[in-house]
Amino acid sequence: MTSPTRLVHIVDEVPELADVETLRMVVALDGFLDAGNAGALACRHLVRTGASTPEGGGVVVATFDVDQLHDYRARRPPMTFARDHYEGYEAPRLVVRLLHDHGGTPYLLLHGPEPDIRWEAFCRAVREVVERFRVDLVVSIGSVPMAVPHTRPIAITHHANNPDLLTGTSPWRGELRVPGSAQALLEIRLGEWGHDAQGFVAHVPHYLAQLDYPRAARSLLEHVELAARLTIDLNELGELAEQRDEEIARYLSANEEVQDVVTALEQQYDTFARAEAEGSSLLAEDEPLPTGEEIGQQFEQFLAGLEGPDETGGQA
């Protein structure tokens, strides 16, 4: 079936979904805020573990026409130049995959680059997918950099277009003006069209925002499990999170100045948590602390050294 907007091609027949009464769709678009690459890590984990075949991947049941949505000059896809000719081009793909959780329950995953243009048309095309496969809940994931220490639990902002979906109190007071995203607009439009949608945003320490941070990815998927009633094997992400935590601990033990900043963040975080100061913000740019970018660059150099060759020619 081809959409009237010609933005999405949906597979005509998916026998496996014919008798499914409850189907959830997870949304993870890249290209906007994804601190610690938490959303991307979570998405890759779902793709790897969500298919019955050893190589993973699942079955693509809907494909969007990226040519109508992507700004190639702003986000140039990588190409391969081999000595004297071009031989490879990694075209961006925006697709919906049919995956299965650890117990065999099917679900959909919409992933790929966030559209640069035609957000409204994109939302209408996603609506077609939702209604074609009778999706009863859409769950989005993402992450933002915050002035929080990595030694405290990952905080999550939960949002939804139906208040009945919310499970807990929001940490925010009043209203915030934030940059828009295709995922956020999709949640609004789906609500207007009578479809439930909710999402989770992980708060990632701003000094780790430029690094892979598996602990945030794991936390996101734990919330997806509960909301979508799925069972996801998170052992691999848990192991990666432990390795990253050990790397960070080693770095801090050898760099007292950075440890002092983390300690200040811990004190600030704990004070905020106790007082629940109304109107206070944990956004990194609002805090009179050393920039997370500077600390993050130091972490990045340290962690890159762990992956590079040592002086003997082996691997560190």
Image: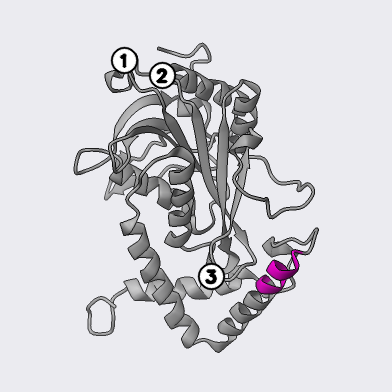
Mark 3 residue element:
loop
Q: Quadrant of residue 148?
A: bottom right
Task: Using the rendered image of the protein, determine whether residue 130 is visible from the camera's viewpoint.
Answer: yes
Q: What residue did someone put label 3 on?
A: 150
Mark 3 is on which residue type?
His
Image-based side of 212 in relation to 187, left or right: left
Q: Quadrant of residue 316?
A: bottom left
Q: Looking at the image, which residue is at 22% across and 38% down? A: 52
In the image, farthest residue toward the left: 54
Q: Looking at the image, which residue is at 62% across and 42% down? A: 159
Whether the residues at callouts 3 and 1 have beta carbons within 8 Å, the answer is no
Q: Answer whether residue 131 is magenta in the image.
A: no
Mark 3 to mark 1 CA distance (whole Å)? 46 Å
Mark 2 to mark 1 CA distance (whole Å)? 12 Å
Magenta range: 269-276
Whether the residues at callouts 2 and 1 have beta carbons within 8 Å, the answer is no
Image-based side of 96 in relation to 284, left or right: left
The residue nearer to you, when weighing 116 against 99, is 99
Q: What residue did someone put label 1 on?
A: 13
Residue 140 picture location, percent across and down? 52, 40
Q: Is residue 21 above or below residue 162?
A: above
Whether the residues at callouts 2 and 3 have beta carbons within 8 Å, the answer is no
Image-based side of 140 in relation to 49, left or right: right
Mark 1 is on which residue type?
Glu
Task: Using the rendered image of the protein, determine whether residue 72 is visible from the camera's viewpoint.
Answer: no
Mark 2 is on which residue type?
His
Q: What residue did someone put label 2 on?
A: 9
